[in-house]
Amino acid sequence: MTRHVRALCILAVLGLAACDEQMPVEGLPESIDAQLRRQFNQWGVVPIGDLGQQDPRLVALGQALMFDKILSGNRDISCATCHDPAQHAGDGLALAVGTGGTGSGPARTLGAGRSFVPRNAPTLLNSAIGMPYVFWDGRLGRFGPPLADVVLPVNSGSLLVSQAMLPVLNRREMRGEKGDVDVFGNPNELAQFEDTQSAAIWQGVMQRLVAVPGYVTMFKAAFPSVPVSSLRFQDAALAIATFQMDALMKTGSPFDRYLARDNAALSPAAKRGAVLFFGEARCSSCHNGPFLGGRDFANTGIPQLGPGVGQGAPLDKGRGELVDNQFYQFAFRVPPLRNVELTAPYFHNGSFATLEAVVKHYNDVPTSLQTFDPATLPANVRDSYHGDAATINAVLASLDGRVRQPLHLTDTQRADLVEFLKSLTDPAARDLSGIMPASVPSGLPVR
């Protein structure tokens, strides 16, 4: 074979490799793009499906309800207070501040006699579509245990609808305490119910809504076949969920473009980080599927802080606090990572403020927990850090096997991982100010 013919053969082979990256050519190294697409197949990483067009009447009603403080017992907090557009549908706090608080975002402060919500408010960006569980402990899920003292309507629909029904029941988040008065000095009638009376609380919220002419008009438009007297809070929750699907699904990131086979969509550093993410760094053992997470629970050695939950207080045992889930001590839902760059602070209690800190934690989880510096926490939660040896040992005792061993990543590798995580950001998610209405039917202030 002449030199010229050999050259043509080599060029032909290279051309074939470029046309079909998933077909490795014997004798040639696998390209980084081919390697990534093979890893995507292994971990079920596929494009997020199109949700289709949402009913604009439901969207309009859901937008008003999302931002209206009338849903809270004291008329002082809305869903959007803790899922603030200015904070990318979170609140930017380590631990959420519910009813009685003042201000917004990271500047929000506790009211007199109030205490922090035990966990932070996770972002609603790409929140629950197609997920088997929601909330940090997965207490609401298609396959999870029943909720204590709460009976959700059997036809409530998707998890996103059911999720919207629960915060109005929670005293610390939205409902308030017995004896509370609202912002007008009137008794908080929603707080008088016992915690087991979920149906009565939902009915009380609906009585507020249908007493507002503007809401009657909007409900009639969204549910034209349902008499006003037959409306239920699950109808309001359906509208809220529809608005969230319309306004908060953001799937235009560089990573989405890469999944659509635009090889130039990711930078070389992001590609190197992706190879680590799906390979040596073992991130994909938890963060997989279309949303890169949301389908599993893990104890990843997160420092304990806050007032605690349930029988475990002042500790928060996460899913281990639920009935018949003691196996999951200190385990929390693995969050989906789409748009994760925008949703600091991280983990269920906001104990890490940056992606760099998160990646460093995962590089050696036992050491990170044992050497955690509470000075890195916001001042208002620093005193609630539980750094005693007994607590640390208890967390380590049930540490997930996937994070027990150090990764030994270099500084450059950790930086590449961060670049990959940033590639999951849809530019349209950076500014959500356009989803906020100028006013709501109740007349209460939106901000």
Image (tube, grey):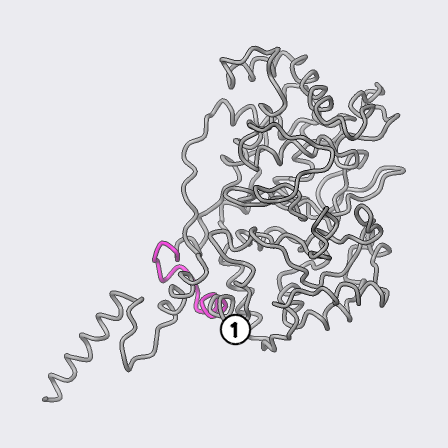
Residue designated by label 1: 280
Main SS, magenta residues: helix
Q: Residue 377: x, y in percent?
A: 77, 58
Q: In the image shown, does 443 or 247 lie closer to the viewer? A: 247
Q: In this view, does 285 lie to the left or right of 73?
A: left
Q: Is residue 437 magenta?
A: no
Callout 1 crowding tier (Cα within 10 Å): few <14, some 14–19, many ≥20: few
Residue appearing at x 66%, y 43% in the figure? 139
Q: Identify the residue at image location x=67%, y=48%.
A: 136
Asked if residue 389 lies left or right of residue 85, the reply is: right
Quarter-of-image position of residue 326: bottom right
As displayed, is residue 67 above or below residue 377? above
Residue 75 spot, x, y in % from top left: 75, 25
Q: Which percent across, then down, holds residue 63?
A: 57, 28
Write the start and end of the magenta stretch as one range: 258-273
Percent position of residue 5, x then y:
11, 83
Along the line of sight, which residue is nearer the eye, 255 or 161? 161
Quadrant containing the C terminus is top right
Q: Is residue 37 left or right of residue 429?
A: left
Mark 1, secondary structure of its residue: loop
Residue at 18%, 74% in the rendered image: 12
* Residue 357 in which image quadrant: bottom right
* Nearer the observer, 33 or 398: 398
| Residue 272 is inside the magenta segment | yes
Residue drawn at x 80%, y 44% is: 116
Q: In this view, does 421 lie above or below 87?
A: below
